[in-house]
Structure formats: structure tokens, C-alpha cells
Amino acid sequence: MTVLSDRPVRLRFAPSPTGFFHVGSARTTLYNWCVARQMGGTFVLRIEDTDAERNKPEWTEGILSAMRWLGTEWDEGPYFQSERTALYAEAAARLHGAGKAYYCDCTREALEDRTGDPNQGYDGFCRTRGLTVGPGRALRFVTPDEGTTTVIDLIRGEPTFENALIEDFVIVRGNGAAMFLLANVVDDIDMRITHVIRGEEHLPNTPKALMLWDALDGGPEPVWAHVPVLVNERRQKLSKRRDKVALEMYREDGFLAESMRNYLMLLGWAPKEGPELQPFASLATQFRLEDVVPSPAFFDVVKLTAFNGDHIRLLPFDEFLDLCRPWINSDSVPWAKDRFDEDLFVALAPLVQERVSLLSEVPGYVDFLFTDEVAYDDTAWSKVMLKANVPALLGAVADAFGTCEWEPDALKEALEAAGVGVGVTKRQQVPVRVAVTGKQFGMPLYEPMALLGRDVVVGRIEAARACLA
RNA sequence: GGCCCCAUCGUCUAGUGGCCUAGGACACCACCCUCUCAAGGUGGCGGCACGGGUUCGAAUCCCGUUGGGGCUACCA
């Protein structure tokens, strides 16, 4: 990493509370957090809530809880820009006093009338009018008319911008509120931020930030790193309107924080040592900002899901049980809550752990243990039960189960023998599975039957056979 | 339109001039294992966008073309 100064390393994550916590933000946070940890730096959380109309307190709550879930705790903050307006006002006054900013009362329409081109930026009409503060008057920053501004970026090299093409941008709105760029730069200076890691969409803002930084005598500029955007299958930036972007939703789907971290770290970067699937602690020490690839990455839920299954299987059993709790105690569970049997669940959970790839799949694997009436899956019923030999098979199995020893191996033996007895020589357990569990797929059959008991199992087989009569 | 960014299997990536007949992961296919489904094992399919240079040698460096993306608000 380039060392630009020996100042204490300070990074920040600066979201605006205008919606759900985005998976792209999650990756940016992860990268910030890793660099902060590696360099012994401080990770600051700053809520950029300068736009009162769009911000909601619940979104801030969402940001905090998402970051806690992700495990990227901040060391300082959260600071709220809405509580720091005096700082921005002071900076604005300084710029105005120094002739580096001017008040402007032009409307968009007036500008367009003058230029005749709706695509053209502000023409500097008010630069020399000497307007003073007043309602409806915005403060614009005077940008240089010549020269270039180069951003030194750890990921993208040195993008260079023509100053003449950068308009005199607004830094304070007509209502007196600071704009993003002003507040952002003032805070980065004030908080002594040394490294700015943020989304690529901010790259065009950076030359403006640099100009402000200089105009405000901000001291050493931060190290910049603009990480590539995350895109959907159509290769467009993930947007909250079109795409499923809320970290919270993935959590609710049963994704583990560990697999989320693992997958997100890999979007644009790969560890030099070891496989892709790794504990976050190991990835966090290996991460190198300068190795982040500069091209956009597709957020692939299929691969995420595969990672999640792998991480679930890697979990110590106790941890898996703990993580299952919210799902098996949920109100939407497909069984009467007082019928839940802890011991039964714990006994069979290992068979579930090696099968699910999402925690939300857990109830569907064990529901038949806690219901009196088996709910038959329509597809399973029509694909498995409507064959001619099924009633005979179920009858024979019910008979055999009436007398055989009641433990898994004996059940297997009895079931298979009964099947052969009626001419079914393979997959004999499938119809019995549908009768007992209601589904054609699931955990191994003999273990749960052994625990459910003879009466229940035989009863279910008879009940299914009765349905076929 | 303007400015900026990007370009290795379908996807995420390894690759920093010879180790590349381009490696891994996800997905997909086949086989093995097997009480269903998974898991696991083995194998397979599949890629350097194109055109010019530079060089003894280019996926790697340069230029161009094409394609994709981001930004272009008194949003952040």
C-alpha cells in the first residue's frame, strides 16, 4: 500500500439512510473494514443524512443492524451529518469569503434559455454578479477554467479530468442545506480520513472533491480506491427498484453472515492462498486493495447459495442448532407450536444440516415430525402413489412393520423384504416416504421412523393406503 | 450528446512478456457411491471481443475499433 503520510490510518463508511442496506454497500464496508484492521486503523461510520426529505430514521437503524450482522463493527460514530451543519456553514462562509464560491439564483430554465442546450452544465452566469446570501440562492463553487485534475486511485490508476468540463457545482442549496460534496469533503477533512474506499459511481465526483479539499486547505489528500459496481444479469448496476439488493432480505432467506462475507469479498478479488471458500478471518488478512479487479461483477445468487450450503455443512453442530432457532420458532412454521419436540429435532438435525443450502429450508425437512396429519405434496403424490402396485406395497410394509424389531436397520430390512414380496424390487422406500413424510425427497427415512414409533408410522401408512382405495 | 471507467470459460476469477496445450470456483453433463434427496468422489463441456503494432516471444505492453457500464440534480 502506498504510504502518503505517517498520519494515523482512518477509513470511513458513509451511507445515506435512503433505503435498505445494499449488498454493494456491504462489500464496500467489508473492504473498508479489512483495510482498517490490517493497518491498525480506525473505522468510522458516518451517516450522510443531509437531505431531510429522503432520510428516514428506520433506514439508519437498518444500516446499523446490517453492519452488526455482517460483523463489520465501526470503531467511531455513527456521526450524523444532520448534527454537523454548523461545520458546513462555516466552510461555505469561508469559501464565499475567499471568493471561491458565489451565490446564484439561476433556475434550470433560465440556464437552458441562455445555452439552448439542456445537456450543458452551469455557465457561470452569476460568478461576477456579487449576489449575497438569500432565500432560494444556491452557493456555487468556482471551478478552474483550465488545467486538469488527476485522481490517484489504487484500483483504477490515474483517471484525469478536464477542469473546463467541470461546472461550477452547487455546494449549498437555496434552503441553506449543504450538498453532498461539501458535507462529504468537510467531514473527511475534519475526521482526518486517510483512505476513501467507495463505489465506482463516485469517481466522477472525485475531481470535484479534490478541488474542494484544496480550497478548504484540507491538508494531505486521502488515498482513493473506487471499487467496481455490482451488476445484475443484464449487466446494469444493481438498483433497489429492479433488483433484490437488500442485505436484510438475504438474511431473511436464510443466508449466513459468513457465506455473505465470503462471497462478497470474492466479487472483484481472489485470495492468493487457498480455495475460494475460506473463513472470513483468513480472507480479511489476505485482502489487498490494489489487487481488486476494476471491472463490474455480477452478483450471482446461485453461487452465493452454493457457498451458503457449504458453510452450513462446515458449521459445528451446536452452532447450526443455534442458527436454526429463528426458523423453527417462527410463527410461520407449518406445525402447531406446542407439538414441537426439541429432542426429536436435535436427534435428526444432523441429517438436515448436510442437506440444506438455506436455513429457511429447515422447517420443510422436519415438519412431518410435528404434525398428526401428513400434508401430502401434490407432485409427490401423483408421481409416486398412483402406480398400480403401491397399495399392495403399503399393505405389505404395514404388516411387516407391525411385528418387526423397531430400529433403523431392521426397518430397512423389513421394508425391502416386504417390497420384494409384492414384486417391487427397487426404490421400495419411496411410497412409504410419501406416506410418512408427505414428500418424495428428504432426510434418510429409517432414522425418523424409528424415533416416531410403530403406532404413528403404521398409522400413517394405513392412512395413505386408505386414500388410495 | 459530453466526460470517465471497463473487457480471460455462461458467471466470479488466477494470470503482471516465455512456467499457458490458459488454472480454480459456481452452473451444466456423465459416471461412481447410495434407502429418496442431498453431500462426497471421478471425468467432461466451455474462454483470452476484434484489428493493428512493439518483441526472438503477448492473455499479459501500446494504438485503434467494437461492445458494455457509470456519471451528467439546489440526490447521495
Image (cartoon, coloured by chain):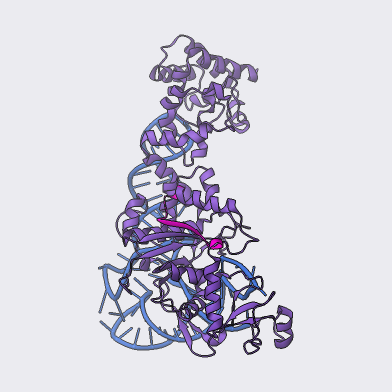
Chain colours: A purple, B blue
Whole-percent x, y for residue A218 in the image? 43, 76
Res. A29 in view: yes
Q: Nearer the viewer, residue A91 or A393?
A: A91
Whole-percent x, y for residue A171 in the image? 58, 75
Q: Residue furthest top?
A: A403
Whole-percent x, y for residue A220 in the image? 38, 76
Q: Nearer the viewer, residue A378 or A109?
A: A109
Q: Is residue A437 left or right of residue A3?
A: right
Residue B75 found in image quarter: bottom right
Q: Nearer the viewer, residue A3 or A338?
A: A3
Q: Is residue A432 left or right of residue B57?
A: right
Res. A299 in view: no
- Image quarter where the C terminus of chain A lies is top right
Point out the stretch of residues depicted in magenta.
A69-83
Q: Is residue B27 left or right of residue A269?
A: right
Whole-percent x, y for residue A108 in the image? 71, 78
| Residue at image coords 52%, 90% | A146
| Residue at image coords 49%, 71% | A186
The image shows residue B72, relative to residue A247, as above or below, that is: below
- Image quarter where the N terminus of chain A lies is bottom left
Residue B31 found in image quarter: top left
Q: Is residue A92 left or right of residue A111?
A: left
| Residue at image coords 54%, 19% | A393
The answer to whether residue A31 is magenta is no
The image shows residue A447, relative to residue B57, as above or below, that is: above
| Residue at image coords 61%, 78% | A139
The image shows residue A189, relative to residue A410, as above or below, that is: below
Q: How many marks?
A: 0
The answer to whether residue A79 is magenta is yes
